[in-house]
Amino acid sequence: MSQISNNLKYLRKKKGLTQQQFADSMEIKRSLVGAYEEDRAEPKYELLKKFAAFYELSMDELVNEKINDQWKPKTRGDGSNIRVLSITVDQDEQQRIDFVPVKASAGYLNGYADPQFVGELPKFNLPFFNQGTYRAFEIKGDSMLPLPTGTIVIGEYVENWNDVKAGETYVFISMNDGVVYKRAGNKLKDNKSIKLISDNPVYEPYTIEVQDILEIWKAKAFISSEFPQPSPEPTLESLTQMMAQMQKSISNLKN
């Protein structure tokens, strides 16, 4: 049985919108909203798709899931994320890329799925990023040198987490670690956790549980005011640190 009418009514009230306000946002008549919520009519495919994008849900969730205060977005058994993100474009049909600065990282954990929160984030556009859904994140710290703190990493939304490839870099959004830019140490398929690796060998790899992950963004480009510097000649101290790190890693593997 379709849950469209109940879900539309619940989601609209959850966002504090009147039927008229929601109708204005969707560019339809208010009477249609009433008809959909009272189950006197069902929206056509294109309009349903627009509703789902507005609430950042998949159409399957909007139609079949019973959405209420106890409901939570689900992931498929294969670990892939089924949430659909909406995008905005400028007058030239160029995608506007949402930018998450460090100061907004904490709020992003609660607002990443809230269209109103995302809509208030700073935005910019780049002419060669149009196919896909993109978001930009400011990274903090030196764990991914030579990219320094303050670098902006532009990521493409990973809808199917089975597409994550070992050795490639991603922005991982998780409940425990927040926004982190790391290299994937393994694929997610058939795994309940993923190893995150820093490019700076001073930082040891660690694992996070798949159930704690909220979003994954594949790194596609970066913006930095600092140009990467050539690697210095290795010193005795740096070589000693590398050897100690290798010995520790080998010891962990044996254990």
Image (cartoon, grey):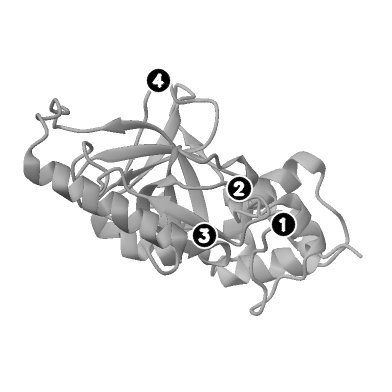
Query: Seen in the image, is 4 located left or right of residue 123?
Result: right
Q: What kind of element bears circle 1?
A: loop
Q: Nearer the viewer, mark 4 or mark 3?
A: 3
Q: Which residue is mark 4?
A: 127
Q: What kind of element bears circle 2?
A: helix
Q: Is residue 13 above or below residue 215?
A: below
| Marks 4,3: beta carbons within 8 A | no
Residue at 47%, 47% in the rendered image: 185
Q: Which of the marked residues, 1 or 4, is nearer the chain's N terminus?
A: 1
Q: Is residue 125 above or below residue 206?
A: above
| Marks 1,4: beta carbons within 8 A | no
Kindly identify the amino acid type of the residue bearing the numbered disc 1.
Answer: Arg
Residue at 67%, 59% in the rendered image: 75
Q: Which of the marked residues, 2 or 3, is nearer the chain's N terminus?
A: 2
Query: Seen in the image, is 32 located left or right of residue 54?
Result: right
Q: Which residue is mark 2?
A: 161
Q: What kind of element bears circle 4?
A: loop
219 or 204, which is in the foreground?
204
Q: Which residue is mark 3?
A: 214
Extreme-right residue of the structure: 1
Q: Where's residue 228, x and y in %? A: 17, 28
Q: What kind of element bears circle 3?
A: strand
Q: Which residue is mark 1?
A: 76
How many angstroms separate mark 2 from mark 3 (CA)?
Answer: 11 Å
| Marks 2,3: beta carbons within 8 A | no
